[in-house]
Amino acid sequence: MSSERFCILLAKCLGKKKEKKLLKSSTSKVEILPGTLLLFLDIVKNSSNHLQFVLETLDQEDVEVTCDRDDFNEISKEEYELLISVPTCADRYQIFLNKEWMQEGQKLKVGDYVEVYDKASAKDLIGILRYRGHVQGVSGIHFGVELVYNKGQGHSDGLFRNQRYFTCSSESALFVGLHRIRQHKGLPPPQRQSEPAGACGTSVYSQYGKANAYGLKKGFDKYCLDKVTMALTGDNPVGSGTGKYRDQRLFTAKQNHASLVPILGLMKEEEYMNESRPVPQLINQNKLALKVQYNDDYLLILNIYIFSEYLNEGLGEVLTGQGSQGNNSRHKPSPEPDPELGLGSLVEVMSTKPLYGLIKWIGHLPDQKEPKKLIAGLEMEEETTAGTDGTFGSHRLFNCPPRKGLFVPLYKCRKDKRFMDERQMRSPSADRSINFGSTETPDLPGTVSPPTSLENISLVCGKGRGIQGHHNSCYMDATLLAMFYFTTVFDSILHRPKTSADLKEYTEVQQVLKEGIVNPLRRHHYVRADKMMKLRKLLDKVGKIPGMMSEEKDPEEFLNLLLNEITKADPFLKICAEDNQETQHTYFYQLIMEKDERLVLPTTQQLFELSFLQIGIKLKEVPSCLIIQMPRFGKDYKMYKRILPSLELDITDVLENAPRECIICGDLAAYECKECYQVHGAGLNTIAFCDGCKRTSHQHKLRVNHSCRKISVPPAYHDYYMRKKDEGKPVPIPREKMELFAVICIQTSHYVSFVKTGKGRDAKWIFFDSMADRMGEQSGYNIPEVRECSDIPRWLSDECYSDIMKYPEDKTLPEHMRRLFCDAYICMYQSPQVMMFK
């Protein structure tokens, strides 16, 4: 093990699954996220004689990654042990980049005061580090913390999976990974106080309680509400209630002197006093005590409690094969499980409280008393108090994040109806095993306007925001969010009525796009992947591009299919050649030009003008939307290393019929000379001349043979200008400018987007990644994320040019700056004035 070289991935890469130590075909490629931990294997050369590094994932199922040296960092064995305990790649990546956090993790020692993030209260709790090291059944270094102020918000008394690591008050200990602990930098908290004495003469002990309960509390058992819950009261505070349950008064107690607790958290006082460790007792409604076999792992007992609470089963059923009446031989036999369920099936656990999970294991539990009963090991959508990481007792049966693994009888599972259409729900043999998470996004009829700004950042930004990606959908996710989230420039395709020339599926596509995707995105700021899959299925059916359901595509392919083939939107651009007035119609413009080596850090303004100049074309009119493809081809070729998207795109000098200003005197221009490009300065505005300045400038021996072209000016404007000039009144010549509202970027076959959230140069921007994180690894689902990028207006200003040039290497640029400048693929511009009439 000492020779192993551990690494962490810094950029998204594609990996290949391995089966029986053999690489599968290229169709088995999977996306590996930044933050993935890797084991260094080898260095190879690709077809271009370029060195590539081969690594293998450590926290996923045998995936091999080939990447560049800049895509990963080597880490020490101790750093690996600290990071492997962090459950998500995104958190792992952020912690690694935070050198102070990593150093704290390596230096923390027993006795230090620390702050632990509590997910339930979303607060940092102060505690004392009592243990640092490995814990039972979980990989990596964990930290055992005794809470100082917040007793009752912990999960144990220093016991973790039946292994004692330290001793403290009940419910005052937390075991966490590095992602939830930081060094406490304030004054040392006061020492913990001794626990208050309990009242005498009580009948049961409870190991459960609220924040104001300390350790094992004495109380009287009053009512058994069901097979698993006991209402408790006592002389000392034992909870937060007064004896009222669901608007029904069960008994009367003082405030904070009543609590509802699981029966498995109770045991008789005399048994507690005589036992060296707690032995849970089942007290049924007839006041009969049934001894439950105590397993080496206390979580086993808690799991039984969860089964019973949600499945209305007796507490000992899983272990004993019997119901709550103990050895009652007349209990009903278990029904047969659904034969269609198997590994990978999405299921709903039949209960009064909705529970959803993914089957990752089916079989018989160790020491199971009824071998005929199949048990399903589920990875749940949400963490549970009794959840494991896929272990049952001391046996590992499958892998999943901590506190998400549960074992239930297979016959208690049925197919998850949330992912079944009407036909599937009617069919008993239908099965789907795609998991998109529990946050639903119902269709939203009507018309929903885009958000007007980013005033409430918490609604728009964060994980679980934007459009959820699934199976190579990033090209579509990034494009649709850019098209519809904060602008209406494409809204005409959402409202145009169907005509006889349209596809028969036109209305269905329009409805899915509008009510299933655009409206929920604008109103609720989230679209689940099943809605995107519905659209992709329709596009795959009616379009001419195969593989829309699963294969990688480019945004321009999707845009052409949606705008041209299906919705038949009016083309945004009308282009004509200078020597041929025949008009061509298109939806986007690919920047094509010969590379100008003088441009070190070109802007889209410069490249746009250079492309029109070299090809010799003009725009017939101002478009409502201008979609520009950068001079690159996917991830394989870039003409320029970096490109700065211009916040405003001045299109005046590429318009066929627009007034322009003479570069020399400022009067209304009458001619343009392409051969004068770069003579009087940079930009197409330097090649326009009035009649007099054109004659004077071209008397120079270097320009005498230049060929000039007459500029077309609308007659009405020409007459107006000349009249005002004769009157001696200055007439400003207008400039036609379009504003940047989105940039779609590509890196390693993955598309993301930057989107403007308001109007004006200073409006805030967001960054969107539909696959920023993942839940459940190979059988799980992607987690989209939206982040605020308020620095974009400053980055794209002239003042920031010198700051950008201070970073000679792309990898040294800040993350979002690097993705915006180095990975720009499509820039989207709009004209607010023209939009109002289109």
Image (cartoon, rainbow, N blue to C red):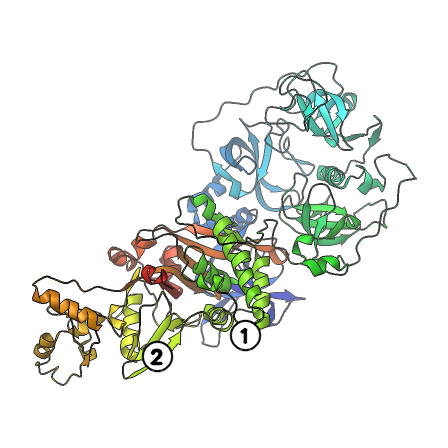
State left or right for residue 491 relative to residue 248: left
Q: Is residue 198 visible?
A: yes
**Image height check: is 673 above or below 766?**
below
Looking at the rendered structure, the number of numbered marks drawn on it comes to: 2
Q: Which residue is mark 1?
A: 545
Q: Residue 604's image quarter?
A: bottom left
**x, y percent for residue 484:** 45, 58
**x, y percent for residue 586:** 40, 74
Label 2 is placed on what type of residue? Thr
Q: Which residue is mark 2?
A: 583
**x, y percent for residue 189:** 48, 25
Using the image as rendered, state which of residue 610 and residue 506 is in the foreground. Answer: 506
User: Residue 797 bears which disc, if any?
Assistant: none
Using the image as rendered, state which of residue 520 and residue 332 is in the foreground. Answer: 520
**Image height check: is 54 above or below 92?**
below
Q: Residue 432's image quarter?
A: bottom right
State left or right for residue 255 relative to residue 302: left
SS under mark 1: loop
What residue lies at 9% left-to-right and 76% top-to-bottom?
A: 692
Locate the C terminus by quadrant.
Answer: bottom left
State left or right for residue 361 relative to residue 11: right
Q: Residues within 10 Å of mark 1 (few under 14, many from 20)?
A: few
Using the image as rendered, state which of residue 366 and residue 829 is in the foreground. Answer: 829
Which residue of the protein is positioned furthest toward the bottom in this rendering? 705
Marks 2 and 1, Cα distance to the nearest angstrom? 27 Å
**Image height check: is 625 above or below 691?**
above
Query: Earlier along the polypeptide chain: callout 2 or callout 1?
Result: 1
State left or right for residue 61 relative to residue 315: left
Q: Residues within 10 Å of mark 2 (few under 14, many from 20)?
A: some
What residue lies at 18% left-to-right and 74% top-to-bottom?
A: 687
